[in-house]
Image (tube, rainbow, N blue to C red):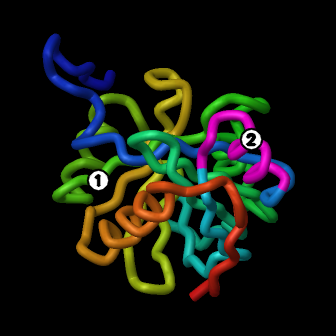
Amino acid sequence: MPNPPHPGQAALPSRLVQIAYRVDDLEAACHQWAESVGAGPFLCRSHLPVTARHDGQPAVYDHSAAFGQWGAVMLELIQLHECEPAAMREVLEHDAPGQANHFACFVDDLAAASAALEAQGMPLTMSLTTSSGMEVRFHDARHVVGGVLELYVGTEHLRDFYDKVAALAEGWDGSDVVRWMESS
């Protein structure tokens, strides 16, 4: 049986830096979020190149994403194109419209943070490596936070991207909501 956190011991590693929602139409969702809550502008990437694994085996995680600022936190909108195997897809497609899909946290030690979540009953659902070599882990925490927890080390490169998204929101006038980027 997993060991639950003790009172006062945080189950979430480090600091929450992002909330993500799965959407059917990425551009339409960007406009909806901008109009309804003022989030944005959104930096969008189509078919992000990643190498995914589930239970140590190769997996498929083909998605496009939009990254914008919503107050103090980054907002990610995800359009899933293909996700296999079915066991991984079941966890990553758990959400209904309007429900958060996952929550991202910066961690100092990815392996240790991942092991701590597993020890607390939040199994690893997917690990992936981005085209830049960044390692990311997704844990099934639906029974704890209602979604998946995404963990990655807050490298300088990644923090620079978060800072860029936040800076774009400073003084943003609501125009040019969707800004497509290269998917490298």
Q: Which residues are magenta?
A: 28-39
Task: Tell me what residue is drawn at x 37 percent, y 53 percent.
Answer: 151
Instruction: Please provide percent x and percent y for residue 22.
Output: 71, 46
Tell me which label, 2 or 1, sits earlier in the chain: 2
Task: Tell me what residue is drawn at x 24 percent, y 53 percent.
Answer: 107
Q: Label 1 is placed on what type of residue?
A: Phe
Location of the C terminus (image quadrant): bottom right
* Marks 2, 1: nearer the viewer: 2
Callout 1: few (<14), some (14-19), or many (20+) C-alpha neighbours within 10 Å? many
| Residue 58 visible at all | yes
Instruction: Please provide percent x and percent y for residue 71.
Output: 45, 40
Instruction: Please provide percent x and percent y for residue 5.
Output: 22, 21
Task: Tell me what residue is drawn at x 34 percent, y 41 percent.
Answer: 16
Mark carried by residue 35: 2
Up/down of 11 relative to 162, above or below: above
Task: Tell me what residue is drawn at x 78 percent, y 43 percent.
Answer: 32
Up/down of 60 relative to 22, above or below: below
Asked which secondary structure carries label 2, the reply is: helix
Q: Label 2 is placed on what type of residue?
A: Glu
Q: Are marks 2 and 1 in contact (CB under 8 Å)?
A: no
Q: Main secondary structure of the magenta part?
A: helix
Q: Badge 1 is on which residue? A: 106
Q: Is residue 180 magenta?
A: no
